[in-house]
Amino acid sequence: MSDQESSALSGLRLASHAPLDAAQRVGRRKCSRCGASRMFYCYSCCALVGLETRDVPTVELPVKIDIIKHPNETDGKSTAVQAKLLAPRDVTIYTYPCIPELDQSTENIVLVFPGPDAMTVEELWEHFSADGKPRVKRLKVSDADPETHSCPIQRVVFIDSTWNQTTRIITDERLQALPNVELKSRRTCFWRRQKGSPDTYLATIEAVYYFLKDLHSHYFSEYTGEYDNLLFFFSFLHKLINKAKQAAGKV
């Protein structure tokens, strides 16, 4: 594990990985829905395998997340299912050409995708208050915080695919009206990095996590780990795979 990767995943406020350790010792099991052999969860059925619901944290998000998955994206390489398993009430996954109903007359919606016209998270408020009457969502950061805070958006769309596959989705006319948001440059910790791609190309679960972290910091309060558990599976698998690489002398 590089120092940068160690730094990015260290200090996270995570639920106990003890259930994952126990499940890993038992090994792969059959998914109760499709019968496929899986470890921790079935990426085809979006279901836990060898784990109970109580073993996995549930993360409450301040916005709804829609993930549009490319039909040729390999399920086993995608991290989108982790977001759905950890934030089931707020995350929905669609397989293109199916996309969510995007009604911009009732919600402020953005698409997270880089480009020349993409704005930053900091610029969201200015963009959506151009008419002087921003449509905002008021909510409490936590039960311990009685103050309400304003969020300039209600829904966020992510694309789950390799960069070579994104053109087909990003050029869909149904997405053209959505304003784009570009994340700050961060290095991925994903162990299945796309061949020939820079290390700033994030896995989907990383992109969701960093977007929410930035959103929270700018529109709610100082970030204190509210969405760290979105990396519950990702951080454990990262540690597991790096340990295996070290044992094999590949690190």
Image (spheres, rainbow, N blue to C red):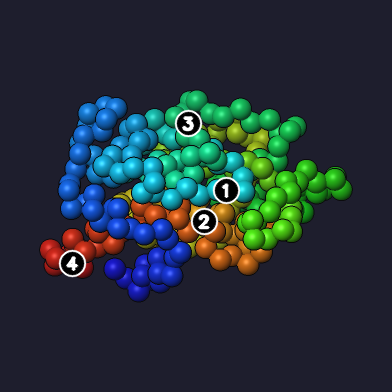
What secondary structure is found at the residue carrying circle 2? loop
Can you say which quadrant of the picture contains the N terminus? bottom left
Q: Nearer the viewer, mark 3 or mark 2?
A: 2
Q: Amino acid at mark 2?
A: Tyr
Residue at (80% x, 46% y) in the render: 134
Q: Circle 1: is it few (<14), some (14-19), or many (20+) Cα within 10 Å?
A: some
Whether residue 17 is visible, yes or no, is yes
Q: Residue at label 4?
A: 246
In the image, residue 128 lies at what x, y percent? 76, 47
What secondary structure is found at the residue carrying circle 3? strand
Q: Nearer the viewer, mark 3 or mark 1?
A: 1
Q: Which tag, 1 or 2, sits closer to the chain's start?
A: 1
In the image, residue 220 lies at what x, y percent? 68, 59
In the rendered structure, are the residues bearing label 3 and label 2 in contact, judged by CB atoms less than 8 Å apart?
no
Q: Is residue 243 above or below residue 97?
A: below
Q: Which mark is residue 37?
A: none
Q: Residue furthest toward the left?
A: 248
Q: Residue at label 1?
A: 61
Q: Amino acid at mark 4?
A: Gln
In the image, residue 172 lies at what x, y percent? 55, 30
Q: Which tag, 3 or 1, sits closer to the chain's start?
A: 1
Q: Is residue 152 left or right of residue 143?
A: right
Of 80 and 169, which appears nearest the observer? 80
Q: Is residue 248 left or right of residue 140?
A: left
Q: Amino acid at mark 1?
A: Leu
Q: Residue at label 2?
A: 227
Q: Quadrant of the rendered structure where residue 111 is?
A: top right
Q: Nearer the viewer, mark 2 or mark 4?
A: 2
Q: CA distance from mark 2 to mark 4?
A: 29 Å
Q: Which tag, 4 or 3, sits closer to the chain's start?
A: 3
Residue at (40% x, 69% y) in the render: 10
Q: Which tag, 3 or 2, sits closer to the chain's start?
A: 3
